[in-house]
Amino acid sequence: MKMPLNKPKKIIITKPPKGGSTPPGRALIKQALLALIIFFSLVSIYSLISDASKAVEEISLSTLAQEISLGNVSAITIIGDNLEVTFIDSGVQKSSKKETGTALTTTLKNYDVSPDALSKVNIDVKNDQGFMYWFASLAPIVLPIAFIVFFLWFLSRQVKGAGMQAFTFGQSKARMTHPDDKSQKVTFKDVAGCREAKEELREIVDFLKNPKKFLDIGARIPKGILLMGAPGTGKTLLARAVAGEAGVSFFSISGSEFVEMFVGVGASRVRDLFDLAKKAAPAIIFIDEIDAVGRVRGTGVGGGNDEREQTLNQILVELDGFEPNEKVIVMAATNRPDVLDPALLRPGRFDRRVTLDLPDRRDREEILLIHARQKPFAEDVNLVLIAERTPGFSGADLYSLMNEAAILAAREERLKVSQFDLIRSIEKVMLGPERKSHILSEKEKELTAFHEAGHAVTASVLPYADPVHKISIISRGRAAGYVLKLPLEDRKLQSKKEFLDDIAVALGGYVVEKAIFNDLTTGPSNDLQVATALARDMVTKYGMSEKMGPIALEGIGGKPLFGLGMGDKEYSERVSAEIDAEISKIMNDAMKKVEKIIKEHRKVLDTIALRLIEVETIEQKEFEEILVVHGIPLKKKKDIEHQT
């Protein structure tokens, strides 16, 4: 049973991998078979036509003269020395041949055909030198030869293409956005928030537009700009906006596109990319997810000839090779700056680092306004309220929120997006869609209601926990129920007291199940994972353990510091045991705190749980009324300011 903390959990959608390309040999066989099928089809059609033409009966000149004398012939068509004879009664056509160099009338007179009988026959002479005559004459010979030549050329082209693919691996796969392409142009007006980042990047725009101002005074613009921030904060969008503001060519490529299975391909693609950018200067090269090739070298993974390291070496060389007047700026983005090689970050390379934080309330409101440009809204929509209820949302999360709201409105056959759609889409982005088909039994429903009530009561009593906005036992995503907690204001820092209260709130459902039902289920598994990870971070990252003292033993995500190998640790087994003991102490202290709260506020716990069983969802207003009735004070903004 999941319970969101301060930062909403992101839903990572993994796209299915695309099918691999057909091997060149197999593709060649398919092309050859296709060509053979076409060839045999044409031969068959031609044979049918030839057979049809050969089916015409041929008669001799004497027989023709006799038929004309009897008055059975209506028309004769002369094509060279060939005669096409049409009979009156049956309309059947027969063929014959006349004497070469002699007129047909002369020949017929020699066969004693009278002039009166000959006058009744319509004689038509056709030119035998036209295109159709020569085509009909030469087609049986020329067409097969031409098709064989085409077939051989087609096969050689396929073989050449398959063989030449190896020579195109080293070409850059960067996608270029031309400055005149209005459909893909992005400017700073399209990027909300990031005020400090945009001010930092305006210098880059000014340099690309007017480099003489900087060069005359002896200033050198930074060669590399590294955009750092959480996923979805707009790093790629901001890089495109710089190119759009400056009106220069924009080359974009992912760090993973440099590396192939062939040795040296990555370095070759780097050289090709920088050559293209220099020819199109002024230009911007943007490398997304640069940590794919820019990780710390010498970790023992892949050896000295590791293709990734060779690619990184080539990037370092290209960055050093720039001259100030070349007007080529390299921008890169990553959400893991801690794993980058120090040589990549030294002065002269990516020496200007721009940090993009999650948007605050005002930034979220501006981002929502941008995404609301083409959406019709109802009169009750209040984007200020939506911005207040989405702390911790990135720009990508807000885009998804607005899109989900529009989808909900369209699904219900409405022409405008209402405030209710936006509220529902917040929970959908945070926790996933409602699983209305996931029906709980009466016992599971009761257990889930008390579990979520335990989270809510604990959060309401503890002074440093965030206030509760909603409680529900309707399944969403993988959670059977959830408690929506949101801070009263955005926070950049979090104190030790707030961490301890968050751990206690996470254990609220666990303690309630154990105390009331005298049993435990799999429901609190996610809560225990969140609480344990938070306790470990307090000990190993933030120096919040009294026993361990002010020392950082792990980096982001529990990884070792200072670029050590995957199996290396920076502390001994004794310290590791002390860390485990300290984490256990934090968790046990939090559990004792929650047990005391549940015991003292059992009545309000029962009230909330029974109400949940009845209505399944309790909104903030109703929940606060229950708290006031039972004498629990509500949290106001001034109380939080006084505590911090």
Image: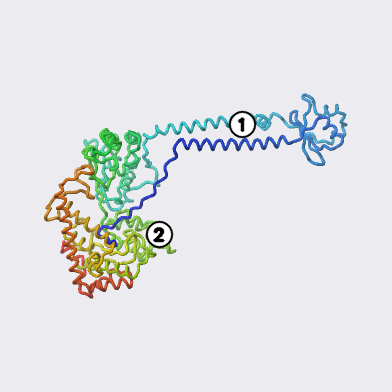
Q: Which residue is mark 2?
A: 407
Q: State the image coordinates of residue 412 (x, y, percent, origin top left).
A: 43, 64
Q: Which residue is mark 1?
A: 143
The quadrant in which residue 434 appears is bottom left
Q: State the image coordinates of residue 629 (x, y, percent, origin top left).
A: 23, 75
What element does badge 2 sit on? helix
Disc with the residue nearer the chain's start (1 vs 2): 1
> Eyeballing the image, is 626 above or below 235?
below
Is residue 205 something that shows in the picture? no
Quadrant containing the N terminus is bottom left
Instruction: Residue type at mark 2: give it.
Output: Ile
468 or 190, which lies in front? Answer: 468
Q: State the image coordinates of residue 463 (x, y, percent, origin top left).
A: 18, 65
The quadrant in which residue 299 appears is top left
Crowd band around label 2 with a 10 angstrom C-alpha radius: few (<14), some (14–19), many (20+)? some
The quadrant in which residue 119 appears is top right
Q: CA distance from mark 1 to mark 2?
A: 59 Å
The colouring scheme, among rainbow, by chain, secondary structure or one colour, is rainbow
The residue shown at (40%, 59%) is 407
Spot the residue most to the bottom.
629
Crowd band around label 1 with a 10 angstrom C-alpha radius: few (<14), some (14–19), many (20+)? some
Q: Is residue 32 left or right of residue 202?
A: right
Quadrant containing the C terminus is bottom left
Q: State the image coordinates of residue 305 (x, y, percent, origin top left).
A: 28, 34
Is residue 424 something that shows in the picture? yes
The residue shown at (38%, 50%) is 15
Instruction: Residue type at mark 1: give it.
Output: Leu
Q: Is residue 38 left or right of residue 410?
A: right
What element does badge 1 sit on? helix
